[in-house]
Every structure is written in structure tokens, then in C-alpha cells.
Image (tube, rainbow, N blue to C red):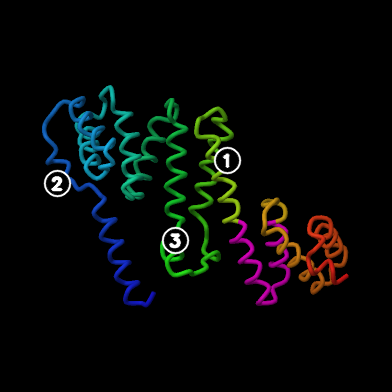
Amino acid sequence: MNKFNLKIVSLSLFLTLAACSSSPEDVEKVPDKSAQALYQDAKQALDNGLYQKAIPILSAIDSRYPFGAISHQVQLDLIYAYYKSGDIAQGVALIERFLRLNPGHKNIDYVYYMRGLMNISLEENLFQDMAGIDRSDRDPKHARSAFNDFKTILITYPDSKYASDSRKRMIAIKSRLADYELAAARFFMKRKAYAAAANRGRYIVEYFAPSEQVEEALVIMIECYEKLGLEELQRNARQVLTVNYPNNPAVRDL
């Protein structure tokens, strides 16, 4: 994809995301009905996948009837609508407000789950998939946040219906975080910062095993410890590599 086409895609993405947000004018255009009547309209839109249509209706209920009987459900539906429409910033802001005001709500596990999904969405790089660019060196701050949200569900709400999927997503995120640490280790290796590279490798082995990144991390540790003259640490790392990855070239070369 050339730069011109990439700019067009970027502009199209910006316009699409901009169109997702509900403006005050959109909310004001919502008919003056009871909360229940408006909620029925919103549910119909949600059921039909018309999330951008549902957002101003739900927003109108939220602003007009903030203490109504269905206020919490309206906010939960609005969080979902923001997520499905791609308006992650508004969704995260609403989640933060909900967690602050309703920490003991019966559906709080769902709120953490949705924040995890939104952080994953922020982490995903559209242009990496389109252009084949490896960005494993990019700081995975949103991946870490998502990991913590899913971890909260497993630890605090182990019986949640979102626990199983949260566990699966944590495994996938774990690989992303390990990729970042491995990219950092390679970076330090190229610059002959062997102590820093070895520390990154050890971090992968300690916190991301088992994962496919561990094998290379051990190889990096062995080479770094050799450069640093740390024979015992090198021997220990080589032993771990030998036991777990006997076919690795570093083992065969012994």
C-alpha cells in the first residue's frame, strides 16, 4: 500500500470514528417520551445492530432520567453501544464513571469485561494488519490494562460468566506482552547493553512461561551472560534451555 492510499484510509477511519460520537444536538433531537418508551426505542435499535441510532436515545435517557429505575441498565447498554460503534473514548469514560459511582453493582464484572475489550480494541493496530508492519516494539500499555481487567474478573469474580473468556484473552495478551519484552531484549542486544538484555530475557522466563518467546529469551540470556563473564548464570540458563528445548541450535552446539 503506497503512502497516498494509506492517507486515504487514515482519513476514512477518522471520519468513521468521528461519526460514531453522539453530539448534544443528536440528544436534543430525541423525542420527549417517558424513560420506558425511549428505552424500548433504544432496545429495538440495539437488537437491530443500529448502535449509532441507539446511542443518542440512551444518552437522552441517561441525562433526562439520571436516577430512574432503569438508569443503571441504560448506562450498561450505552457502554455496549459505544464499544460496538467504535467510540472507545466515550465508552471508557462512561465505564470510569460507572465504576466510581457503582462499585458494588451486581453487573460490575461485565463492566470490567467491557473495559478489557475496549483496551484490546485500542491495542489493535489497523495499519499493522494492512501494511504488514511489525510493531511488537510499541509500548503495550492498553494490553496491560486489558490484562488487569480480565485478571480482576478471574480473581474477584471467579464465578462470573465472563471468567472463561477472560482467561483465554489473558493468554493471548500474555503473548503480546512477551513479544514486547523480547523486542526490547533484541534492541539492547544490538546496542551491546548485555545486562539490560539479559534482564529482559529473565523477565520473560519468570513471568511469561510457558510461551513461545521463552526459548529465544533463554538464548539471549546465555549469550549476554557469556559477554558479561557470568559463568554460573550462563550455565543455569543453558541448563533450562537444554531441558525444555533440546533441539535448539545453542544446545546442539555444545
Q: Nearer the viewer, mark 2 or mark 3?
A: 3
Instruction: Say whether marks 2 and 3 touch (CB < 8 Å).
Output: no
- Describe residue 209's horizontal placement relative to residue 71 as left or right: right
Magenta span: 178-204
- Looking at marks 2 and 1 on the same chain, the residue that comes earlier in the sequence is marked by 2
> Alpha-carbon distance for marks 2 and 3?
32 Å
Residue at image point 25% right, 41% down? 55
Mark 2 crowdedness (10 Å alpha carbons): few <14, some 14-19, many ≥20: few
Mark 3 crowdedness (10 Å alpha carbons): few <14, some 14-19, many ≥20: few
Task: Write down the residue under mark 3.
Answer: 125
- Looking at marks 3 and 1 on the same chain, the residue that comes earlier in the sequence is marked by 3
List x then y, in percent, for residue 148: 54, 44
Q: Secondary structure at mark 3?
A: loop
List x then y, in percent, for residue 47: 28, 35
> Alpha-carbon distance for marks 2 and 1?
41 Å
On the rendered image, what quadrant is the C terminus found in?
bottom right
- Describe residue 27's horizontal placement relative to residue 142 as left or right: left
Q: Is residue 185 magenta?
A: yes
| SS assignment for the magenta stretch, majority | helix
Quadrant in which residue 54 is drawn: top left
List x then y, in percent, for residue 205: 72, 55
Q: Is residue 128 magenta?
A: no
Residue 88 is marked as: none
Q: Amino acid at mark 2?
A: Glu
Q: Amino acid at mark 1?
A: Arg
Residue 25 is marked as: 2
Residue 167 is marked as: 1
Q: Nearer the viewer, mark 2 or mark 1?
A: 1
